[in-house]
Amino acid sequence: MGGQTGFGPVPTGDDGAPFQADWEARVYALSRALRRAGVFNLDELRDAIERIPPKVYLSASYYERWLIAIETILAEKGRA
Amino acid sequence: MSHDELPVAARVRRLEERVIAAGLTTGDELDALLDELLDGASPVNGARMVARAWTDPDYREALLADANTAAGSLGFATNGYRLCAVENTPTLHNVVVCTLCSCYPVTLLGPSPGWYRSFAYRSRVVREPRAVLAEFGLRLPDEVEIVVWDASAETRYLVVPRRPEGELPEEELAARVTRKGLIGTSAV
Amino acid sequence: MTYRPGTLVRARPTDPDHHTRVPRYVRGHVGEIVERQGEWPLPDDSARGIAPPRVEAVYTVRFPARDLWGTGSHTVTVDLWESYLEEVSTDEP
């Protein structure tokens, strides 16, 4: 991501509430709980986020990417 | 309807139900994890550290030498990462980014803002920090050197902004420090 | 191998098919060691569930913007695990 061009101005005003919707907060909490349960570590989560196909990665929102990554890992590990 | 086509909120609800049914967490645990984030993590914490450093030279020295211990001495837990405080001076300005994801000392800054996680910030600030800072309304003189810190490993960075002019008590100084100031995208 | 502050190092040109923490924009570029931060598990291993992961020194490495982008007077510091780096011999231009 560092150094790529074409993303336009920084949304400097997007500085308020941490979550735009309740589901985003639930995704955050799920990621924490699943790490605590030993289902994955933070690097596995980062890896799964980075493995999202670029077209999907760029069109998904931040917590949508987390959601996709969590679903991917659970499917790969056959957990839940 | 396939999984991917469900509205995202419904998809998250379904995921949560599956994870709870598998015995991996409980609704109460999820609520507690969120409360922990929303109650315990705040830029007020980072601001207190900065205001203390501005008013207590010993604390400033301790903060720059070992920021984890300095955070702990004010009661803030910084577990799982090395904290590094970087100080702005009249000739040097620090600004922090995580280009790989959006790492950041949550306890001291609160949950990360949307702009910090945005593709635009993550892609551009390493390349053209002056232009990015100008978008935040921060125009630095040409002679000020800019150092961009890309938090690509296990260190999280906290910027110590320049102290505002005037003799203010520590609490008032702390109230002036914003999250943007602690990341380096605004002055105080 | 311990790199001392001031040593010139090159971020290895690499493009693994798994998670790594060498940002693309420094791969192949030369920077200067600022500090040895301590030792941490290598995320390339932990991301693949390799247990235990290798543990290596992590360094703060400073790159001049002009070298990375051809323009700019700022510097960018990146935190890099030791195996991401190779020493630059001093007779190299």
Image (cartoon, coloured by chain):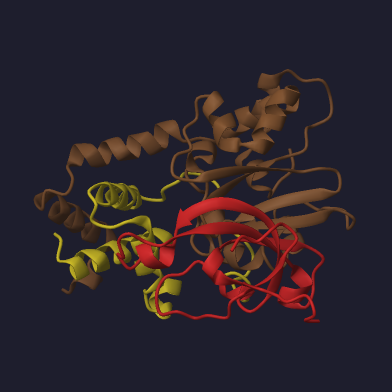
Chain colours: A yellow, B brown, C red
Residue C76 % position (x, y): 70, 62
Q: Residue at x 60, y 41 (%)?
A: B179
Residue B136 % position (x, y): 70, 53
Is residue B1 something one can see in this rendering? yes
Q: Residue at x 81, y 81 (%)?
A: C93
- Which image quarter is the N terminus of chain C in? bottom right
Residue B59 against residue C30 in the figure, above or below: above
Residue A66 % position (x, y): 35, 61
The residue most toward the front is C1
Q: Residue at x 48, y 42 (%)?
A: B106
Name the residue nearer the viewer: B96 or B3: B96
Name the residue nearer the viewer: C69 or A56: C69
Name the residue nearer the viewer: C84 or A45: C84
In the picture, measured across the screen, residue A36 lies left or right of residue A10, that is left
Q: Residue B172 is drawn in which quadrant?
A: top right
The residue most toward the left is B21
In the picture, measured across the screen, residue C35 lies left or right of residue C49, that is right
